[in-house]
Image (cartoon, grey):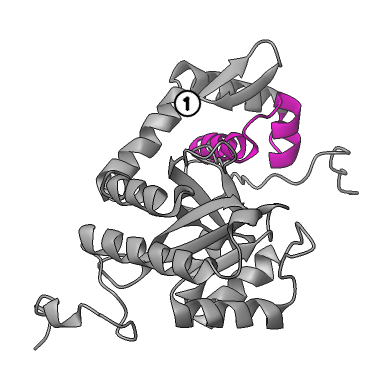
């Protein structure tokens, strides 16, 4: 018997009835919630086509999520957006880690010392997600809404985090995400990109000169958790005209100092190779024989 062809325009669904150990309806709901979050705004048709879920099923899931406040429908634009409960869930995560609350005073000091907008971001796959910001008082300044995502390879914070990961792990990530070009300054070849990460690792801070947005520059440094793993990054961003060659090293040192302070305040520990490592203060290993 000749197999039926899939309906034109609809990709094969990523949700399978036989998914072992998962609840398909919940898989679908979380997939749709994630898709709305990434798109920021999405129509019913776009969500259905992108996920390979029938329109009627997608609508039922969206209305269920809407009932619980995880998504909302914009009557004027006729599309779906993230709801207040999804925001509260994210805030709960940040409160659990303590990262956002602990970082804010340091970020404010960073903004005041540099005159530039201070940002806090966490990694999510091949992207960073901005979770907090202290805006500069300058009339011309950078702004990233909470929840904004950007590619790690073209972000000051992202490059700082990547510089602290094993090269094999970074290469594996890039094999799936690629080195997308956003501006003429984006690093799109492996040789140039890994050379930049090596420089970042050596000096303790990254420099994004218009690699994501023309006219905007960013300097970032990595924050470590209690396992000495990179868990986030702090950065400053602003117009490139204020990031001149003579000022950048001083700004970089200031950002790196902020990252060290935040690492210490959340109970993080620095890798052994870093100067000023806190290894001597490590608690004893209770699993040791």
Q: Is residue 286 visible?
A: yes
- Res 234 → quadrant: bottom left
Q: Nearer the viewer, residue 41 or 109?
A: 109
Q: Nearer the viewer, residue 35 or 167?
A: 167
On screen, residue 79 versus residue 222, left or right, reads right
On screen, residue 197 versus residue 182, left or right, reads left
The 10 Å Cα crowd at callout 1, few under 14, some 14 to 19, many 20 or more, is many
Q: Is residue 194 shown above or below 3?
A: below
Q: Residue furthest bottom?
A: 289
Residue shown at the point (64%, 27%) measured from the top left: 58
Q: Is residue 270 shown above or below 243?
A: below
User: What segment is highlighted magenta in the picture?
Assistant: 26-54
Residue shown at the point (49%, 68%) measured from the top left: 160
Residue shown at the point (41%, 69%) measured from the top left: 253
On screen, residue 132 versus residue 183, left or right, reads left
Q: Which residue is mark 1?
A: 70
Question: Which element carries disc 1, helix, strand or loop?
Answer: loop
Asked if the magenta segment contains residue 209, the reply would be no
Q: Nearer the viewer, residue 169 or 255?
A: 255
Q: Quadrant of the C terminus?
A: bottom left
What x and y, as percent, mark residue 162?
51, 70
Q: Residue furthest top?
A: 75
Q: Nearer the viewer, residue 65 or 172?
A: 172
Q: Main secondary structure of the magenta part?
A: helix
Residue shown at the point (85%, 37%) measured from the top left: 7
Q: Is residue 168 visible?
A: no
Q: Is residue 287 shown above or below 140?
A: below
What x and y, as percent, mark residue 3?
86, 48
Asked if the magenta segment contains residue 51, the reply would be yes
């Amino acid at each position: 018997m000749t197999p039926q062809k899939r309906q034109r325009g609809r990709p094969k669904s990523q949700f399978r009835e036989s998914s072992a150990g998962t609840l398909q309806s919940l898989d679908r709901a979380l997939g749709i919630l994630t898709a709305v979050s990434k798109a920021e705004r999405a129509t019913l048709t776009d969500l259905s086509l992108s996920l390979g879920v029938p329109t009627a099923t997608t609508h039922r899931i969206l209305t269920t999520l809407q009932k619980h406040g995880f998504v909302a429908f914009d009557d004027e634009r006729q599309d779906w957006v993230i709801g207040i409960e999804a925001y509260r869930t994210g805030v709960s995560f940040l409160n659990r880690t303590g990262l956002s609350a602990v970082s804010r005073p340091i970020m404010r000091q960073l903004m005041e010392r540099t005159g530039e907008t201070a940002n806090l971001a966490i990694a999510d796959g091949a992207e960073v997600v901005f979770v907090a910001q202290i805006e500069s008082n300058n009339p011309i300044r950078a702004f990233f809404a909470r929840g904004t995502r950007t590619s790690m390879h073209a972000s000051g914070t992202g490059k700082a985090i990547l510089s602290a990961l094993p090269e094999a792990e970074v290469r594996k990530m890039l094999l799936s995400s690629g080195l997308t070009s956003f501006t003429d300054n984006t690093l799109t070849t492996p040789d140039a990109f890994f050379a930049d990460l090596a420089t970042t690792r050596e000096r303790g801070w990254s420099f994004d000169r218009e690699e994501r947005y023309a006219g905007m520059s960013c300097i970032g440094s990595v924050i470590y958790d209690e396992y000495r793993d990179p868990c986030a990054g702090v950065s400053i961003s602003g117009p490139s005209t204020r990031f001149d060659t003579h000022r950048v090293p001083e700004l970089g040192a200031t950002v790196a100092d902020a990252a060290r302070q935040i690492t210490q305040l959340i109970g993080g520990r620095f890798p052994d190779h870093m100067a000023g490592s806190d290894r001597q203060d490590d608690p004893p290993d209770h699993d040791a024989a």
